[in-house]
Image (cartoon, rainbow, N blue to C red):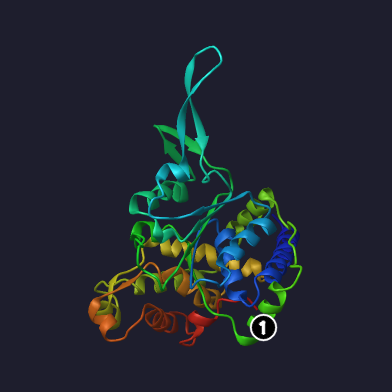
Amino acid sequence: MDIKDFENISAKLAEARTAVAKRVIGQPKVIDETFIAILSGGHGLLVGAPGLAKTRLVETMGAVLGLHSSRVQFTPDLMPADILGAEVLETSADGARAFRFIEGPVFCQLLMADEINRASPRTQSALLQAMQEHHVTVAGARRDLPEPFHVLATQNPIEHEGTYPLPEAQLDRFLLQIDVDYPDRDAERAIVLATTGIEESGVSPVFDAAGVIAAQEAVRRMPVGESVIEAILDLVRAARPDETASELVQRAVNWGPSPRAAQALSLAVRARALLDGRFAPSLADVAALAHPVLRHRMALGFAARAEGLTIDGIIDTLVSGITGAGAGAGAGAGAVA
């Protein structure tokens, strides 16, 4: 893949980003991080209060990227077969009986798992194999999922009644945790004007499945400087509460990120560079993506929470020490210039 191919993909990404921003107003950082998750070949967990266009974002992303999409509303009574599918016994005209597999909504290219923490752990675990291995096992038979396959899940951070916290094993399957905040006043005004009229702007595909796969290959082919790799390793290893960690991390953090976090950050910084039209990632990309990569892969102890410490605050401190960025770089630098 030569420079011209990179430039063509980057130009199409700019067009796709603009198309999504017309329907999801005032959330450029969230849009960029969602693109980064998909370009990296991973999955995204969108965390935000109701009414912040999480569902709208996923639907628009599927349309702009030209991916076959499905949506599952997670509820406490949802069963694994409701996601994966099941075998049913059919009787033919001649009286012969045979099992036929009916595919569930997971057999798509972009699955929206709406309010994923409302389903039971048994149902949540039905997605683990699909997210990691891109195939599922039903009735002892392996069934491959379409390519590409991505999960964009949503979660409400303020209502916990009737929910089941996601286990660490499943959280780790998400490449990024994307926090969705309230828009500013000007953006909210634009939202009201754009969505309460007679007509809303439509969206047309910019990519297709083959184009998304080509963009993902471009991300993996992008070179990464030694300084960026070292910064990623330093950051991830500094977040683990072992004997080499700082006093703050040893005191406050119960468990830290695994090597999967370093893999995720290595891919994400390249995807961010491609989205920005650059041919190599920088330390600024590491600082910008430290929060969405690490925040769901770390846990604070009770004493640290009682002190008022937060995961984001600890990540800010780690980023400042590793990359030389300011304390606020990780929290606010997610948007691409």
Look at label 1 and name its amino acid. Answer: Arg
Residue 8 percent across, percent down from the top left: 75, 61
Q: Is residue 276 left or right of residue 322?
A: right
Residue at position x 68%, y 69% in the image: 23
Query: In front here: 209 or 163?
Result: 163
Q: Which residue is mark 1?
A: 189
234 vs 60: above or below: below
Residue at position x 45%, y 41% in the image: 136
Question: Quadrant location of residue 39?
Answer: bottom right
Residue closest to the far top: 94
Q: Is residue 302 left or right of residue 150?
A: left
Q: Is residue 314 left or right of residue 33?
A: left
Residue 224 visible (yes or no) = no
Residue at position x 52%, y 76% in the image: 288
Residue 107 percent across, percent down from the top left: 54, 43
Query: In front here: 60 or 277?
Result: 60
Crowd rating for badge 1 (residues with CA inside 10 Å; few <14, some 14–19, many 20+): few
Residue 315 percent across, percent down from the top left: 40, 79
Residue 86 percent across, percent down from the top left: 45, 35
197 vs 8: above or below: below
Query: In front here: 76 or 1?
Result: 76
Secondary structure at badge 1 equals helix
Quarter of the figure with the C terminus: bottom right
Q: How many marks?
A: 1
Q: Is residue 147 left or right of residue 230?
A: right
Residue at position x 37%, y 81% in the image: 314
Quarter of the figure with the N terminus: bottom right
Query: In front here: 163 or 280?
Result: 163
Residue 286 visible (yes or no) = yes
Question: Quadrant location of residue 168?
Answer: bottom left
62 vs 285: above or below: above
